[in-house]
Image (cartoon, rainbow, N blue to C red):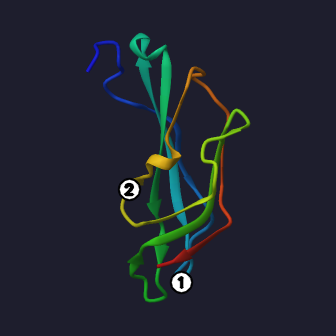
Amino acid sequence: MPQDIQATPDVYIDWQLSNQGCYGCASFYYKVVRRNLGLAFGNRYQFDIYFYSNSYLTNAVRTSTYVYGLMVTADGFPVNKEPVWMLFKEPYSNQLLNFTTTNPYPRIFITWTGVSLF
């Protein structure tokens, strides 16, 4: 690994709650971390988006979250060309939603069509 790569990513957007959770409701957290790739990569920054389930069955058992129609834009440009879907329970990151840019502080918008229990 080249020496100018930042070894530890820093939190760019701390955990955000998608919607208020409840028993029998689907809900999730997401966060964005940033890593400086350094001069060897054209002074670019890599952004990784992580997800964590906040969904519970009606009997209060934690379960997975299914998110569909997921789109990410950075500085007005789409990160993914087509909407994606994800299924997760523990902390999870999807390569389709990771991106690099020369802007260390891009405006990132994360949207989704729906969310359900799984």
Q: Which residue is mark 1?
A: 24
For discs 1 and 2, the disc positioned in front in the rendered view: 2
What residue is rendered at 50% in x and 20% in y? Answer: 44
Q: Amino acid at mark 2?
A: Pro
The percent coordinates of residue 22 (x first, y second) are 56, 77
Category of crowding for the residue at label 1, using alpha-carbon neighbours closer than 10 angstroms: few (below 14), some (14–19), many (at least 20): some
- Between residue 83 and residue 64, name the one nearer to us: 83
What crowding class fits label 2: few (fewer than 14 Cα within 10 Å), some (14-19), or many (20 or more)?
few
> Which residue carries the number 2 mark?
91
Could you say which is closer to the camera, residue 109 or residue 102? 102
Vertical relation: 27 (above or below) 106: below
Where residue 49 sits in the image (x, y, percent)?
49, 45
State left or right for residue 44 relative to residue 106: left
* Amino acid of disc 1: Gly
How far is disc 1 from disc 2 in space, using C-alphas?
20 Å
SS at mark 1 in the image: loop
Quadrant assignment, res 41: top left
Image location of residue 96, percent across then percent down: 50, 48
Element at label 2 = loop
